Amino acid sequence: MTDPEPTTPDDSAPVTKRTPSVRRFLVGLALGAVVGVPVVVMLLPAMRGDVVPLFADETFEAAQQRWNDQRPGSYEMTVEIRGIRRGEVRVEVRDGQPISVVRNGQKLTQPRLMRPWTVPGLFEMVDREAELAEDPQGKFGAGAGGRVTLRVAYDAQLGYPTHVQRFVEDARQDLELEIIRFQVRP
């Protein structure tokens, strides 16, 4: 048996051009990425449940009071730094005084460089950040209309700041500190 002759389309049938579906798909994909990626980036922390609350004077003062009421004399903590300055700081405090502060492997020996990494020093830093946030153009070089968002979380029991985030619009001055380990010592 022989194969049938190939058939040719009827010349009288109307010819329709199809819009390239690949191009339409790529345009849709690009638009989805432009809109979707920023939305996912903004919503991801909320979906994970780890949004750091906005700074509020009342919360700051209540946390500081909790710390002052229950202040352990001796503790160790590790602070992770992200943003414009990255690194890690390991702190040991005995009887209220810093005895060892190591930042990125370098031991700090001067008391004026050690104190900012204690819990009282972190409270002072948060208070200063709140003041600086009032003048983002002068203090951080933000453009006109740029603003600073300050977020701070505190330990529910002892009150020390557990997470500090500073975001500066129109300037590369973002900073994040997170206490990733805190241990009270006898």
Image (tube, rainbow, N blue to C red):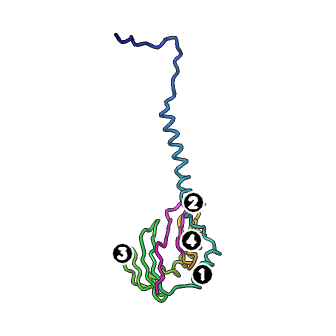
Residue position marked by numbered label 2 in the rendering: 46
How many residues crowd around disc 3 within 10 Å: few (fewer than 14), some, or many (20 or more)? Answer: few
Q: Residue at x 42, y 72 (%)?
A: 88
Range of magenta residues: 161-186
Residue 27 in percent (x, y) is at 51, 38
Q: Which of the labelled discs sits on residue 97, or is there none?
A: none
Residue 182 within the segment the image draws in magenta: yes
Residue underneath mark 3:
105
Which callout, 2 or 4, points at the residue further toward the start of the chain?
Answer: 2
- N-term-proximal mark, 2 vs 1: 2
Residue shown at 51% from the left, 46% from the top: 33
Q: Residues within 10 Å of mark 4 (few under 14, many from 20)?
A: many
Mark number displayed over residue 153: 4
- Closest to the observer, 150 or 112: 150
Which amino acid lies under the numbered mark 1 shown in the image of this protein?
Arg
Element marked by disc 3: loop
From the top left corner, tell me how far across and down residue 156 is, in percent. Answer: 58, 75
Q: Which of marks 2 and 3 is nearer the N terminus?
A: 2
> Disc 4 on helix, strand or loop?
strand
